[in-house]
Amino acid sequence: MRIRTILSDLDSTRDAREALYRHFHRHPELSLQEYATADRIEQELRASGIEEVLRIGRTGVVAILRNGGGPVVAMRGDTDGLPMAERSGVDYAAEGVTQVDEATGKETPVAHTCGHDFHIVCLLGATQALHAHRDSWSGTFVAVFQPGEENAAGAKAMVAAGIVDKVPRPDVYLGQHVLGSLPGGAVGIRSGPLFSAAASIEITLYGKGSHGSMPNLGVDPIVLGAAIVTRLQTIVAREVAPKETAVVTVGSFHAGTKSNIIPDSAVLQLNTRAFDKAVEAHLHEAIERIVRAECEAARCPKPPEFRYYDQYPLTSNHDEPTARVRAAFDAYFGEDSVDMAPVPASEDFSVIPDAFGCPYTYWGLGGFKDWKNAPGNHSPFFAPDIQPTLDRGTEAIVVAASPWLIGGK
C-alpha cells in the first residue's frame, strides 16, 4: 500500500517533528509578521533536499514537488499566531512572548492558541514524506504555508504577490484545521458549507455634545446606540428564516469620557456570521437600514458611517473532491473518519483556490483526547495534545492527496 510506504518514516521522525512543534509553539508571530516562522519553514524544507521553495510576499512560503506527469495537489497550512497571552500551563507554552504590532506600534502578547503551529508541522511532515518517497506517487504536490489567516489578509496577500502566476494551477486545493470539537485523532469532513462567512463592521454614530444637565440641547449618541443594540437583535429573531443560521454580535460600544458630559459620537463594533451569501447580504442591509433609521429618529446632525473589515468568505466544500477525500479517509482511518457539522467560525482558506479557479475541500482534525471538555480555539488554554495530533494531521494530508497522486492505493 503506497500510502503506508510514504508514511513509513513517522516513527523515526516523530521526535524531530515534536521538537519542531514545540519550537513553533514557543515562538508565535502576529499576522503578516511571521518573519522568523517563514525563515524556519524555508530552512526545514531546504534541509530536506527540497529545492523549489518560493517566498510569496513577505512571509508566505510555497514548496513545489514536481514528480512526473499527473494531477497537481495543493495543501495549505496557515502560520500566524494570535495577539493574546497563553495560559495553557504546558511546559512549552509561549509565556511572556510579545511582539510589536506593525499596524499600531504597540507591543502585544502573542500565542499559538488556534493550532496553526500544528498546521505548519503537519504540512512540513507530509511534504518531507512525499519528497522522501517519490517512487510511490506521481504528479505535483504544492505546500502552501500561508500567513495572516487571523486577520483575513494573508490569502489575499499571497494572491496579490502573484501566487497564481508562480505556482502550477492545482486540480484540487486541500486544507485542515485542528479543533477541540472533534474526538481526538478523528478527521471530520462534509460537503457544502463548513465555515461561515464573516465580517466585522465599525459604525460611527454622530450626536451633539452637551452638558448632562441640559440633554435637550444635545443629541445623545449613547441612548441612540443603546436603542440600536436592542433593535439589531430583531434581525436574526424576526428577519432571518428559522432554518437559516445567522449571528449578529455587538462586541464593542465606546462613547463618552465623564458622567456629566453627553458626548458627540459613539462607536459600535459588530460581527456577523452566516452560511449563505444571500443571508449575509441581508444581515448587512438590515444593519445599515436599522442604524440609519434610528439616527434619523434621534435627529443626528450627520449620517452614520460604516467601515467593513476582517471580512471572511464562506468556506463551502465542493462535492466531488470532498467525496474522494472522505472515501480515502474511511479506507485508511476507519471509525476515526467522521461527519463534521458546520462550524460558525470563519476562514480565508477559499481565497486562493477561488483565485486559481479550482475546487477545494477542507476538514477538521480532533486535537484533544478529552474532547468533550476541550477549550475552544482562541481560548488562552488551547493547547492540543501533541500526539496523536501531529501524526494524524500528517497522515491526513497524505491520505487526502492520495486519490490524485497515487490513486488511493
Image: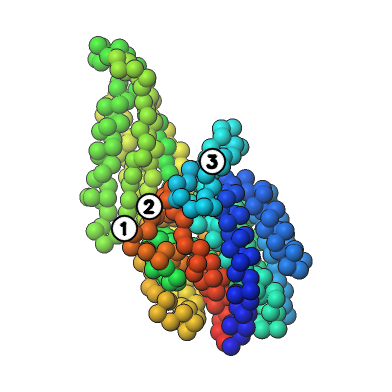
Q: Mark 2 is on which residue type?
A: Arg
* Image quadrant where one finds the N terminus: bottom right
Label 1 SS: loop
Secondary structure of the residue carrying tag 2 is strand
Residue matched to label 2? 273
**Which mark's residue is nearer the viewer, 3 or 1?**
3
Using the image, tell me which numbered label, if any, was put on residue 245.
1
Q: Residue furthest left?
A: 238
- The residue that disc 3 covers is 96
Instruction: Name the residue rendered at 31%, 58% in the picture.
Output: 245
Q: Amino acid at mark 1?
A: Thr
Q: CA distance from mark 2 to mark 1?
A: 8 Å
Q: Can you give x and y, in whole percent of width and height, for residue 373 in the image? A: 34, 59
Q: Secondary structure at mark 3?
A: loop
Q: How is the image coloured?
A: rainbow
Mark 2–mark 3 distance (CA, rounded to whole Å):
33 Å
- Image marks 2 and 1: residues in contact by CB distance under 8 Å: yes
Identify the image quadrant of residue 369.
Answer: bottom left
Identify the mark nearer the N-term, 2 or 1. Answer: 1
How far apart are the two marked residues, 3 and 1, measured between alpha carbons? 39 Å
